[in-house]
Amino acid sequence: MAEELTGNCLIGQTGGPTAVINASVAGVVAEALNHECIEEVYGALNGVHGLLGEDLVDLAAESQQAMRGLRYTPGAALGSCRGKLKKPADFERVLAVFKAHNIRYYFHIGDGESQETAAKLAETAAAAGYELRVIGIPKAVENDLAATDHCPGYGSAIKFIGATVKELSLDADAIGQGDLVTIIEVMGRNTGWLAAGASLAKRRDHPNDPPHLVYLPEVPFANDKFLDDVRRVLKREKHCVVVVGEGLVDKDGNYVSVETSASDAGHAQLGGVGETLKDLVEGQLGAKARVARLGVGQRAAAHLASKADADEAFLAGQAAVKAAVNGESGKLVTLLRGDGDAYTCETGLTSLADVVGNLKRLPKEWINEDGVSLNFQFFRYATPLIQGEIAVPYENGLPAYAKLGKDSVDKTLPSYEG
Amino acid sequence: MAEELTGNCLIGQTGGPTAVINASVAGVVAEALNHECIEEVYGALNGVHGLLGEDLVDLAAESQQAMRGLRYTPGAALGSCRGKLKKPADFERVLAVFKAHNIRYYFHIGDGESQETAAKLAETAAAAGYELRVIGIPKAVENDLAATDHCPGYGSAIKFIGATVKELSLDADAIGQGDLVTIIEVMGRNTGWLAAGASLAKRRDHPNDPPHLVYLPEVPFANDKFLDDVRRVLKREKHCVVVVGEGLVDKDGNYVSVETSASDAGHAQLGGVGETLKDLVEGQLGAKARVARLGVGQRAAAHLASKADADEAFLAGQAAVKAAVNGESGKLVTLLRGDGDAYTCETGLTSLADVVGNLKRLPKEWINEDGVSLNFQFFRYATPLIQGEIAVPYENGLPAYAKLGKDSVDKTLPSYEG
């Protein structure tokens, strides 16, 4: 046992929300309240913005109802952020905020890139001789963190994608007459984890079930092969369902589709690969094509979240607190899969420094030789992650999600201009 | 009581599927089996294609499991079609198919326009002295049939839209900092029923809840007013959620957004109004915008179907059979709302001839003066339609939808070239 450290704890959420990122907050709060050395339980509003701006809220003051609701509420209940802490002065400022509120435990929920912030905060505190324990909690619908078997958020995302593929396929099957191509574009800047997850919509031992073709960023895209693939499926089936990851690249490693945003001074951003494939199909094959771009629904559809995923997100939050109380710092909670045939999951710890910029790609050996389908290794990996449904309460016909009261913690410092 | 007519019955599905169009098939089959005068229960594959091609399947031979599964299975289980019967020879051919299989009851599930086919089939049979009873069963996610209080399919569509608006809004609220505009594009070629339904996501007595702005085809669109609306919301809220119907028109009645399809010789089709609004926001306000185009999910998301809607779709199928057995023909089943405070719904009948081309628009007096929100009259109308959830069975983490066996009925006629 490490020396006991008494003080307050703080939680921050960063990056794109997931269906279960709030379950990790609930896990931290539930566990924090078990430890007498943790006196107050605070949340930082909008991630690093709240850290810099001293915008803290009292999470122990929230109703138990609301905290329970966090286990099935999408979005980021504390608010998230896109930015990171940049200059040394930013880190000094956050340290001042921590000191002002006697924060001794900081829990940072975010993807691989954003955990850099957590790692640097731990260093800053150590350099200043301020006793602080920092633990990162992973979240990523794209499942691309290297240090963990899988990421909280991914299971729910592919459960939604799989169900949607089933439903859109039934619709297309009803009106297809051998000439309808349904193109479903999913997220995945650099990896095909989400696109691969769509293949869970296939029934076991029905390889010809939709999705018929899955195009992954891991497999270089070629127009001719694509058109041949679609032709082959249209000949065999009444219609063709294509799933494509937004980060699809050609043989030279260039994105197949890039669009520019008017707001951002012509800064190129990913997107629209579905439309590119549609143009190919309609222009070259004379077939009909329709595009569904699943967009933010992939990470927000908590009404269809995976119970396994939500439970593990909660568990990761609990594990973070236990680790910190036990004296750990500068670590990321990971999910570890058991070796047995039946799926089991427990948590581990890895160094935050090892996670940053370390991308996990879909293993090439999980992709079939045709380049457009996944083999049993992927199914064995992904199937346990989508198991179970959450009994989201409904009110007046719609999911009743939780809303925090967000009692502000009094500020004691001058404001920070940055 | 009408004279008893003994023979076989046939069901056809047409147009875009809905989350509950198969519940109507289940209703027809369940009721048909109650009547001894109905001997065989057949389905036509792919609507009018099956009628012309003599492609019939035996629905009584399906397992009870599968028929029960139809109550929560999206798509059109019998297959749907886009086309209609055109020339007199087509109608004569269908009559020959009916005679060959002793079809005396025909049930046509479709939207207002497609019911023209049902009406003409009744006429063709009458002119030929062939005793046939034809009953139409309404379905339309767009809710635009004039003769009925509402259409099966609409309630489930707006339940999905409402839930999705809630979820995307929570996501946007988490990362919005006063400059994020979420634009959600929903279906609705000519009417704003679906866009209006998005407003069910607002909590009662919280008019500032998302969706903040709803743009309806019923209200002429003006760029300046739109930009002012968005500016006002961004000033008040952390972010702005806009819902827009694809059929939005300007003051001259022209569609705000039309796109051309490469497959269709440059034939213009609706779509992309969300992108048009995004360009306005980013170009004129310098705010960030993201577009979610809900697409086919609106009509296919049976995992989130409304129980009230599915039950009424089933009821409409049952009512069609009862009416036909009672001697009715050339009629459409309608849904009638009771006068009392508590919502009740029973079925009625109207002439098929009265339905064709008779579009029901959203009443102007249900739209607030601001032109971007709905008043209590809409909420009173729409809220009952999304009540209740269906216990869709899950298998291995995903909804387990039904698949019909589709035992073919032997063909007896030469093939038809049309």
Image (cartoon, coloured by chain):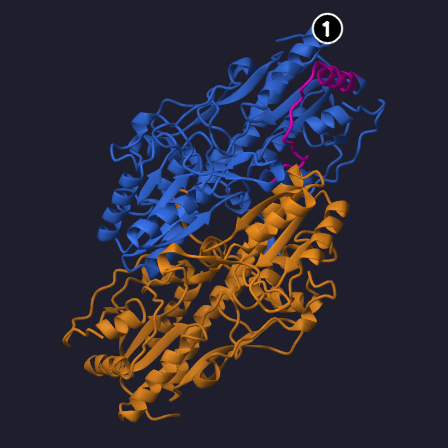
Chain colours: A blue, B orange
Closer to the camera in the image, B227 or B295: B227
For the C terminus of chain B, the image quarter is bottom left
Q: Is residue A238 visible?
A: yes
Which sits in the foreground, B26 or A48? A48
- Residue A54 vs residue A236: left or right? right
Q: Amino acid at mark 1?
A: Gly
Classify residue A165 as left or right of residue B283: left
Q: What are the residue bounds of the magenta stretch? A: A73-99
* Residue A76 percent location from the top left of the image: 63, 36
A409 in relation to B207, above or below: above
Mark 1 belongs to chain: A
**Magenta stretch contains residue B89:** no
Q: How many marks?
A: 1
Where is the N terminus of chain B found, in terms of image quarters? bottom left
Estimate the x, y position of residue B353 in percent, counting from the top left.
Answer: 44, 85
Q: Quadrant of residue B289?
A: top right
Determine the secondary structure under disc 1: loop
Q: Is residue B208 above or below residue A302?
A: below
10 Å neighbourhood of mark 1: few (<14), some, or many (≥20)? few
A217 and A48: which one is in front? A217
- Residue B179 in percent (x, y) is at 69, 41
Above/below status of A373 relative to B335: above
Question: To which quarter of the image does residue A317 belong?
Answer: top right
Q: Residue at x 71, y 16 (%)?
A: A91
Residue B35: in sight, yes or no? Answer: no
Locate residue A313: give its quadrant.
top right
Residue marked by disc 1: A129
Image position, residue B132 (x, y; %):
31, 86
